[in-house]
Amino acid sequence: MAAPKAPVLQPGKTTGEVTLDEAVFAAEIKPHLVHEAVRAEMNAARAGTRGSKTRGMVSGGGAKPWRQKGTGRARAGTTRAPQWTKGGVVFAPQMRSFVVKINRKARHAALRAALSDHAQGGTLGIVDSAAFDVASTKSAAALLASWGKSTPTVVVATEAEVNVFKSFRNLERVVVVLPSEVEVVALVWARSLLVTEASLELLQRRAA
């Protein structure tokens, strides 16, 4: 199998091709590992801070509101029972962590699978950051238009490539992230992927 390649893109034109690392961009795509990684990342993003008080947590209600017999009313032991106003909640939800553990090897395999899917599907492009000597949303839009791929698009750029960040960040359905922040869930969500030349090596090293 030939090594995968990706076009090098500038606003309005394609200037060449880059040969990609086969170990990262021609890896076997294992849907079950991708599913595990997406589930783990989405669970990790959940706050898990909801919660209500049970009858044992609500303050007050320590005294029996009336005597057991002789009043004609139903017996009651506390005013904090669920059927009372200001009472506790039955089976109240509690704060919890939704974190799901996924092994490091499985996480890296899922990242390689998501990257390989873009490389094999022709939806991976390399941004020539030298073309963005100044920040220009118009130039970024021209690059996407000439490339002709569907959005949403994830753009990966390093911290030093400030002009690339500023150029792409205001475009609709485009998300710009650092190589260290690339998640499998974002790659699965994206219909196309753009990576700068500087961040390509960092991304390959992370997924290896």
Image (cartoon, helix red, strand yellow):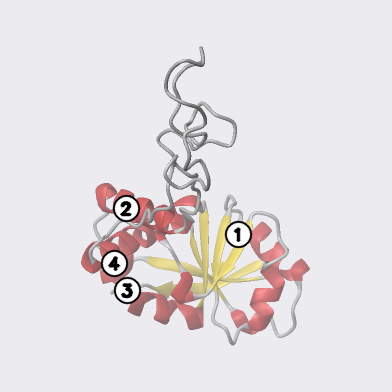
Q: Position of residue 74 (x, y in %)?
A: 47, 17
User: Sequence-wise, which precedes: disc 2 or disc 3?
Assistant: 3
Q: Which amino acid is tagged 2?
A: Val
Q: CA distance from mark 1 to mark 3?
A: 22 Å
**On residue 34, which mark appears?**
2
Give the camera-side residue of 15 and 89: 89
**On residue 108, which mark appears?**
4
Tell me the quarter of the image containing the N terminus.
bottom left
List the residue tagged with mark 3: 21
The structure residue drawn at horizontal position 58% and vertical position 37%, both measured from the top left corner, is 86
The structure residue drawn at horizontal position 44% and vertical position 77%, both measured from the top left corner, is 200
Q: Nearer the viewer, mark 4 or mark 3?
A: 4
Q: Position of residue 42 (x, y in %)?
A: 43, 53
Q: CA distance from mark 2 to mark 4?
A: 10 Å
Q: Position of residue 146 (x, y in %)?
A: 65, 60
The structure residue drawn at horizontal position 40% and vertical position 35%, both measured from the top left corner, is 91
Q: Nearer the viewer, mark 1 or mark 2?
A: 2
The structure residue drawn at horizontal position 29% and vertical position 63%, both measured from the top left corner, is 107
Q: CA distance from mark 1 to mark 2?
A: 27 Å
Left or right of 131: which side holds 177? Answer: left
Q: Nearer the viewer, mark 1 or mark 3?
A: 3
Tell me the quarter of the image containing the C terminus.
bottom left
Secondary structure under tag 3 reads loop
Q: Which amino acid is tagged 3?
A: Asp
